[in-house]
Amino acid sequence: MKPGEVLVRVSAAGINPPDWYLREGYAELPPEWRPEVAFPAIPGSDVSGVVETVADDVQGFTPGDEVFGMIRFPSYGDSHGYAEYVSAPSSDLALKPNTIDHVHAAAIPMSGLTAWQFLIGLGHDEPNPLQPDRHRPVPLAGKRVLINGAAGGVGHFAVQLAKQGGARVIAVASSRHAKFLVDLGADEFIDYTKTAPEDVVRDVDLVIDAVGGPAADRFLRTLRSGGALFPIFPLGFAGHDEAARLGVTVSATQVRSNGAQLAELGRLLASGAVRVAVDSTYPLSQAAAAHERAAAGHIQGKIVLTVDGAEPHPHRATSASQTTWPPRLTGH
């Protein structure tokens, strides 16, 4: 263990798209962006567990603390989250709220930080690998915000953070997620299997496209002049000229580890102001099956690997039995 690090006994690990990008040798990235990775490599960056030991120079954590975090991201095969023990920079970790179990805590870091850094605050000054300019969140109070892919990992956090910021939220997902998203605070819901949102929505201030990719340019027509489109996965987007013509800003960023921001998000989760959804859980030995579930799509929240027998409270979640935690507080 190096200076500044904490050794964590892992109870649960969240799975994220970069895990299968690594598994597939980053084939989805442009060749010039593909990192050199020494295989075999251990995927996974999101963990929740218990501190075993800390380096002599670490402050703020002691053995026995329950913590969660996104470790060394962006990284390429050296986060090692799918494991029983993992060493992590202390700056990547936050104390786990005691109102949240390890399974739900492991579902938070990458998705929660992505939504936070796109919508609330970037939290770093690193160069943007995705565009020449720094990504800048926009004010949310009083704005109309459309969120595509609203039921997924990033999307369901984006819905809640936009509402916390005072926005009116239009959530786009399939019909099976309608009640879930309304319960999280969505003001309007569009079932994309029946209605193309770009055909019926106009003059919104911000679009968060949690699906992203080449099809994200269809949302340009939903925005007012001066509005913004934030594709979470911007690779393949080809609408920059059209955006400039319409007076729309298109911006994205690379999420980065940030324990301080996780602590802020943790306070919202502890109070019940923000909740986290778990689509399904699998033991670590069935990580391949968890990836198959992810590939099947239509995820509600996150998929989590249990490492030491940890189970979600109040009951085990399956693809047909999703849970959110904490429960909505009375009057919230």
Image (spheres, grey):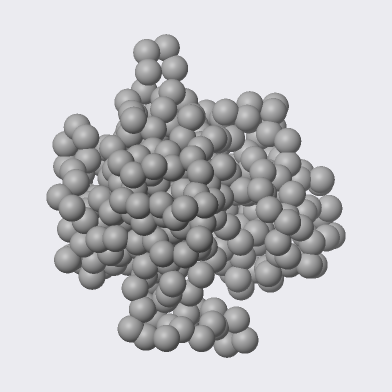
Task: Choose between 300 and 113: the one closer to the eye.
Answer: 113
- Which residue is rendered at x = 43% and y = 74% of the image? 77
The image shows residue 271 at horizontal and vertical percentages of: 43, 23
The N terminus lies in quadrant: bottom left
- Which residue is rendered at x = 54% and y = 35% of the image? 264
The image shows residue 255 at horizontal and vertical percentages of: 58, 57
Task: Choose between 146 and 13: the one closer to the eye.
Answer: 13
Q: Quadrant of residue 134?
A: bottom right
Q: Which residue occupies the extreme top position in the image?
A: 331
Q: Is residue 327 above or below residue 276?
A: above
Q: Is residue 142 above or below residue 197?
A: above
**Left or right position of 37 against 214:** left
Task: Choose between 322 and 22: the one closer to the eye.
Answer: 22
Residue 8 visible somewhere in the drawing: yes
Task: Choose between 149 and 63: the one closer to the eye.
Answer: 63
Q: Which residue occupies the extreme front position in the image?
A: 56
Residue 175 visible somewhere in the drawing: no
- Which residue is rendered at x = 18% and y = 65% of the image? 286
Q: Is residue 7 above or below residue 185?
A: below
The image shows residue 135 at horizontal and vertical percentages of: 72, 55
Image label count: 0
**Left or right position of 180 against 309:** right
Q: Quadrant of residue 312?
A: top left
The image shows residue 141 at horizontal and vertical percentages of: 69, 28
**Left or right position of 198 against 227:** left
The C terminus lies in quadrant: top left
- Which residue is rendered at x = 18% and y = 58% of the image? 283
